[in-house]
Every structure is written in structure tokens, then in C-alpha cells.
Image: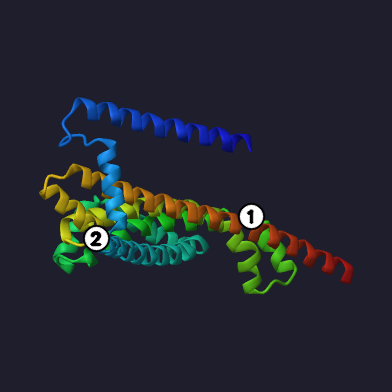
Amino acid sequence: MKPCITANKYRIAATVLVLGLWWGMSKLYSPLVVPPIHMVAAKVVEILRSAKLWAEIGKTLVRLASGLGIGIWIGCLAGLFGGMLRPVRELVQPVLGIIQVVPPISWLILAIIWFGFNGRASIFIVVMAVVPTMFICISDGIAAIDRKLMEMGAVFGFAVWKKLRYILIPSVAPYFISGLKIAVGMACKTVVMGEVLTTTSGIGGQIMTARLNIEPETVIAWTVIMVGIYYAAVLAGKLVRHAAVLVKKTSHRRMRTERNKLVCWM
């Protein structure tokens, strides 16, 4: 409990520090350079009250979810085979390493050439950002599984689905959650960047429109909303992580039950 309280104190202190710096800079510079906090807050409220602007948020969320879904599926599938089969890992890892270091703007330019000026380019660069991260986390998680657990499962005659449920998934879950947290942050940044340069819709499109109209308070307001979306996703991830911990504890209890049954039978 105490570490959680301490962490919350630091978060509150960091928030107060950022707001204090923002307030001080807004007093030193013109609103066109650093808009005051109340102007940004009013713009955020205006956006959240507008059904039309909620539709723009929805477009970004659809692109974000699509890119994340495709990227996570490909990354996890490749990571699964990479973790279980060393030749596959040695073959795929260098390719994904190259993909990981290519600047997102390079992928975006290629996406514009391939898909045109539409939302598909944003989805593409999200996928390219997410796949390497999920591959590394999942393959490392599988490689780190205690082989004694697998041997124990074989001794107890576990079917494939039991090994997946009681050994593989609980062991890999922490790696998956860590990779997902990184992937969501990268996806939030890349999807908006893609929208800014390829379409007039979504949060990125609204940011570009505000830039053309010289409305810095609107740019910051949309940025605040995107940050809020990210932290909502992080909160959802924490709930999933707690669920994974419960699953792991349940699996360990059931494994002990199976072992006790086997001992009694012998």
C-alpha cells in the first residue's frame, strides 16, 4: 500500500509542477505562443460537448484499434513461433529489427504512395510500429518459460490445451502486458501523426486544421484528449493484468490439485 501512496504523491507533484510551469509561461508569452490553461480547458469542454467532434474522435479510435489489433495479432503469432522454434526466431528477428529502426515518417511516405491520402496510411504505420514490439515481448516470454513446468505438465499427462491454459498463457501474460503498454503508447503517437499528414479527419486532421487557423489552444486541447485516451487504455491494461494474475493463481492451484490427485492414485 505504501509504495502505491508514494507513487501517487509523485504523480500529483509532477502534475502540479507541469501546470505551474505552464501557468508561468502563459504569463510571459502571448496566447498565440502559450495559451492559458483556462483557454485550453474551455476548448476541451467544447470538443467533448460537440457530437461532430466526437465523431472525429471515433474515427481516430477506429484507426487506432484496427492498427493495434492487426499489429498485435501478427506480432503475437510471429512471437509464438519465434519463441517455440529457434530457426524461426533467428530468421524473423533481423527483419523485424530493421523494421523497428526505420523512422515512422519513412513508413508514412511509403504508405501515402501505396494507399493514398486516407486513413489506411495511419493504420499501416501503427501496424509497423506495433509488430516488432509484440514479437520481442512474446518470443522472450516463451523463451523464459521454466522448462520444468513443461516437463511437469508432460508427466501429469496434460493435453495441449491444458499446457496453454495452465503454463503458457500465465507465464507469457506479464510479457504481453508490458509489450501492450509500449505498443499502445507508440500507436497513439503514430496514428495521429499519420492523420496529420494524410487526412483531414480524426484527431490528427483536427490538429492540422487548428494549425492552419493558428489556434494553439485547440492543438493543445486535442493533444490533451489523446493523452486521456492513452491513460484510459493504460487503466484497461492494468485491469487485464490483474485478471491475468488471478488466472495464474488459479492455474497454480489447479496444478497442485492435479498433482495431488496423481499422488493419491499412485
Q: Nearer the viewer, residue 53 or 11?
A: 53
Amino acid tagged 2: Gly
Quick check: can you spot residue 99? no
Classify residue 155 by image quadrant: bottom right
Q: Nearer the viewer, residue 25 or 52?
A: 52
**Residue 172: where, in percent of width, then height?**
55, 58
Give left or right: position of 96 versus 215: right
Give the Cα distance between marks 2 and 1. Answer: 45 Å
Q: Residue drawn 38% across and 50% down?
A: 228
Q: Which residue is mark 1?
A: 146
Classify residue 192 by image quadrant: bottom left
Q: Are marks 2 and 1 in contact (CB under 8 Å)?
A: no
In the image, residue 197 above or below residue 27: below
Q: Which residue is mark 2?
A: 202
Classify residue 263 by image quadrant: bottom right
Q: What colouring does the structure picture have?
A: rainbow
Secondary structure beneath label 2: helix
Give left or right: position of 199 versus 98: left
Q: Residue drawn 62% across and 73% down?
A: 161
Q: Nearer the viewer, mark 2 or mark 1?
A: 2
In the image, residue 161 above or below residue 186: below
Q: Residue drawn 89% across and 68% down?
A: 264
Q: Nearer the viewer, residue 1 or 103?
A: 1
Give left or right: position of 81 versus 209: right
Secondary structure beneath label 1: loop
Badge 2 or badge 1: first in the primary sequence: 1
Give left or right: position of 67 versus 249: left
